[in-house]
């Protein structure tokens, strides 16, 4: 099975890793071959046996391509409930100025808003290019998406933080009641 993904060429180095270590790790651990074209930013994942493993490698490559470090993306290989969700802001905002403003609101001053989203939901958030990528479990992704939509709609940061704190308490309550963790 052969899968193809195109990522920004400035992120290819992160997929390959120092001395090719990341590429080698993905290939050996998952039984795939990565064919990387530095000119076009194209990555082909050739599965030797397991198509599911190839799909997981695709998710890792996609996450790295959307700005996550390899260390933050690797858990996608181990946990099948972990998901990557990519929001394309260019489809949601009009002008370049709006894009800059929205990205600034999502990141916050010195990264504070992104950091709060991550700490209260345990999801990982990356703002890169025209996208926001969220790495987490389905419920975490839902909460972060809702917070991002609130920010895009112009809600004050304080209101978004209150929303995130409320959802954080709800998630903690569910975990304490003994239900399986999301």
Image (cartoon, helix red, strand yellow):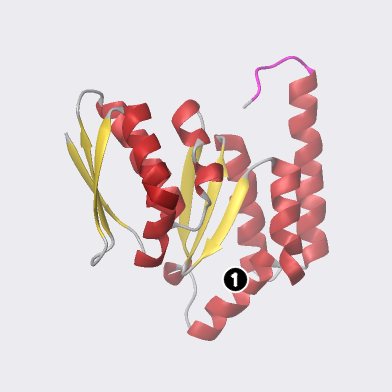
Work out which quarter of the rendered image holds the C terminus and state it. Answer: top right
Q: Residue at x 47, y 44 (%)?
A: 84
Left or right of residue 102: residue 120: right
Q: Residue at x 37, y 58 (%)?
A: 12
The range drawn in magenta is 177-181
Q: Residue at x 48, y 83 (%)?
A: 95
Using the rendered image of the protein, determine whether residue 17 is visible from the camera's viewpoint. no
The residue tagged 1 is 103
Q: Position of residue 23 (x, y in %)?
A: 36, 43
Q: Say above or below: 153 vs 181.
A: below
Q: Say above or below: 49 vs 7.
A: above
Left or right of residue 127: residue 59: left
Residue at the outermost left position: 1
Q: Residue at x 76, y 53 (%)?
A: 116
Q: Secondary structure at mark 1?
A: helix
Q: Position of residue 10 (x, y in %)?
A: 40, 66
Nearest to the observer: residue 76 or residue 106: 76
Work out which quarter of the rendered image holds the N terminus and state it. Answer: top left
Q: Position of residue 141 (x, y in %)?
A: 58, 43
């Amino acid at each position: 099975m052969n899968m193809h993904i195109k990522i920004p060429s400035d992120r290819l180095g992160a997929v390959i890793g120092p001395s090719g270590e990341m590429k080698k790790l993905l290939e050996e651990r998952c039984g795939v071959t990565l064919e990387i074209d530095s000119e076009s930013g194209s990555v082909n994942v050739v599965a030797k046996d397991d198509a599911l493993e190839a799909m997981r490698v695709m998710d890792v490559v996609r996450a790295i391509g959307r700005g996550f470090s390899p260390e933050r993306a690797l858990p996608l290989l181990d946990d099948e409930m972990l998901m990557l969700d990519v929001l394309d802001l260019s489809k949601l905002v009009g002008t370049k100025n709006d894009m800059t403003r929205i990205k600034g609101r999502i990141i916050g001053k010195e990264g504070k808003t992104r950091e709060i989203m991550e700490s209260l939901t345990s999801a990982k958030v990356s703002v890169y290019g025209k996208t926001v990528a969220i790495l987490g479990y389905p419920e975490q992704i839902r909460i972060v998406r809702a917070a991002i939509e609130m920010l895009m709609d112009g809600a004050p940061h304080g209101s978004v933080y209150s929303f995130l704190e409320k959802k954080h308490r709800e998630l903690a309550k569910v975990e304490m009641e003994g239900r399986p963790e999301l």
